[in-house]
Amino acid sequence: MSDLVSADPTGGQRLVYDRPAADWLAALPLGNGRIGAMCFGGTGTDRIGLNDETLWSGGPETARLLSTPLGATGAEAVQEVREALWAGDVRRAHELAGGFHSGYSQAYLPLGDLLLELAPQTDDVTQYGRELDLDAAVATTQYDLGGVAVRQEAFVSAPADALVVRLTASEPVLELTARLTSKLQSRPHAVDGGLGLLLQAPADVAPPHRDVPEPIRYSDGPDRGMEAAIALRATTDGELSATNDALTIHGFTELTLFLSSATGYDGPQATPVRTGEECWTLADRTVRAAADRPYEELLAEHQRDHRLLYRRSSLELPATPAAELPTDERVARSDETDDPALAALLFNYGRYLMIASSRPGGLPTNLQGIWNDILRPPWSSNYTVNINTEMNYWPAETTGLPECHEPLLRFIDQLAQAGRGTAAERYGCSGWTAHHNTDAWCWTYPVEGDPRWSNWPLAGAWLARHLWDHYEFTGDLAFLGEAWPTLKSAAEFCLDWLTELPDGSLGTAPSTSPENDYIAADGQPASVTVSSTMDLVLIADLFGRVEQAAGLLDLVDPLVAELSTARKRLPEPSIGGQGQLQEWAADLPEEDPQHRHMSHLVGLYPGEAITPEGTPELAAAAQRTMDLRGDEATGWSLAWKICLRARLRDAAAAHRLVQAFLRPADDSATGRPGSGAGVYPNLFCAHPPFQIDGNFGATAGIAELLLQSHTDELELLPALPAAWPTGRVTGLRARGGVVVDIAWTADGTEAVLTADRDQERTVRYGNDRVRVRLTAGVGHRVHPA
């Protein structure tokens, strides 16, 4: 492309600090999709937090023990709830709806910590710096310790499947001791100069909001939790000695530590049977293979692997003097100073986090990606599938990471297999369903709790949209054929779940709008009702996608005609008395007018049923809804609002939300002052507490500001903030398989479009449109007026 913009990429590619991490929310994340590491960068004493994406409490046996419903289930029980709703008795409907509930999903667990201690200890530390290089996926700490220059590099290699930590010292006068610890039940395991830790996971971990006598329960019974292990080895030019629980290295100038892990997890339906010793053998085999190779070779291989994904897309925005400050100081000043390069860093960081936490063959990213150090983490660090898991993958296709989408796409199929039994047993419906939560064991039941979050059986409809999105961006018909049974089965459930309403239309009952309440006729909050807007929008979208898929695959299936007929009987969203898009079928007063969930706007984003040109009245109602809700929200909600404002081409409001997202967060657990939602020093999103979905949602939202393709046009800079007068973005992907690079200044805009296959497309810039013919693999330059 032409060099239209002069922007310093450094401010948008590195997180930098001038002090060690004071707590976990200032540590720097590394990952290879499976192994997660949090680097604190301590001097003298250091900590690297460890995670393995497959280490969860419970197992299939625990899920079965917790799945007993609290009351009546089946088609007759559903009909009872409906009859209470027809009679206007929402309290009775609420009570009956609770009968479908059972138990809770399990928790994602911390693996342990690698603790490093340098001797001699001294307070004489100077020239300190630490950073996370997003392009290299390496965390570096360097400092002068009592006159000895120390440098530490750490990365988690996907090809080697290991954490690698390299320390160098300018003089051979230091001693390092490495230990492994864990919050789980554990015992050391030292073999042949290597260090290991054997772990036992709990059989059951209750969510923090559940008050139970034994919230963390270990068991020797059939529901016994999985076992796991960590293996550690070292190579050095110093003198290495090993004890039962430590490795000590004397007088080194070069030292490399190699660490890997293994667990008993073998999929959602398999009871874990591997022992801790067997897990250690697997992990140690990986460690030995890495330790037999030169460090430089491992590093180069790791960087090639990471950059193959990371360099597909990048954003550069103007660098102000703030870009030269440490990242935590930039965040602290974000309320006072506009720092466009910090927004670019946020975008690039979201892509980095996805590569680090979601790789083919693994599990999807959970509420905290793969990084967690708490035994009872917030919301169990599980998969919350009424928004958060979906948001985790919003940037996967648009920013060129379809491989990172694979864990979720595969998991949806596994969830569908489990959800077929839940649909039949709970509701007497065909097809498959899932609710508010799931976990590594594919929990699909409505969890015990309030119906406003529990009684929402449409996670399947929303998750199935990811299958369609992957096809729409890639054009991979073979994938669509593989996804067809899951798409069809999700539609079968929705078709059975719909019921005829008195006016002859189809609707859902019972229905909730996730996690929100309205004010009922008795003046009290209520959640159970008929036909929430989100329900009908998701079902209409799913039916349409299944019809399209059948046509593309040349399938003749009688279900398609049924879906087409049913879709025509689904009401369009309604506009309420304040000009807002109604959240429920009736214009009901909201219990919380500033509620964080924007469920009724799902048709605007990530759907495309609402567009400013196609449905101007509904788009105006969506805009009014957002104005009434206001900007203040939790971190992930701010991210969704960025996406929504982008779709409305409201650049000023979107930029305001990006700025709000980048404010310094507070957290009662740490006493860190701030504004509530925002980002922590390491740019993790604060709900609060930490949830990674906001990071991914913000990256997706910034991508929507720069390119949109949901109307089949390729719209360049549809909601570009005025505060970003120059910039460059590379590697955004449009539906239909087109890579788009854009550069802009006050003097002009230029785009390069490179298609995966020959096609003609309409490119839009403002109100101007041009039709272009694209040849596969050939960049086509566009100079909008």
Image (spheres, rainbow, N blue to C red):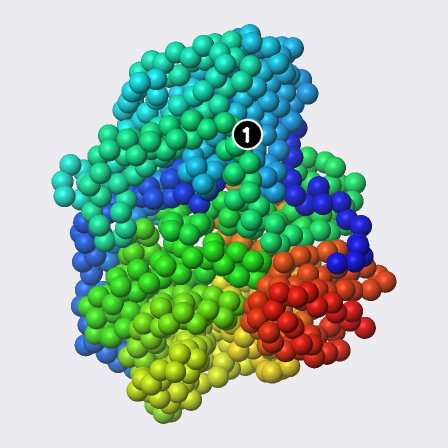
Report the side of 623 relative to 163 (left or right). right
The quarter of the picture where residue 766 lies is bottom right
Q: Would residue 749 appear left or right of 733 to someone viewing this image?
A: right
Instruction: Kindly identify the residue that appears in the image at 18 percent across and 49 percent down.
Output: 61
* Secondary structure of residue under mark 1: helix
Residue named by callout 1:
296
Question: In the image, is 426 to the left or to the right of 236?
Answer: left
**In x, y percent, where is residue 116?**
47, 20
Q: Is residue 26 visible to us here? A: no
For the residue marked with disc 1, what is the amino acid? Answer: Glu
Q: Nearer the viewer, residue 284 or 637?
A: 284
Residue 40 is situated, as x and y percent measured from the top left of the image, at 53, 29
Q: Is residue 746 visible?
A: yes
For residue 119, above or below residue 85: above
Question: In terms of depth relative to the viewer, which is nearer, 724 or 437?
Answer: 724
Q: From the viewer's perspective, is residue 110 above or below residue 450? A: above
From the viewer's perspective, is residue 236 above or below residue 141?
A: above
Q: Residue at left 45%, top 33%?
A: 163
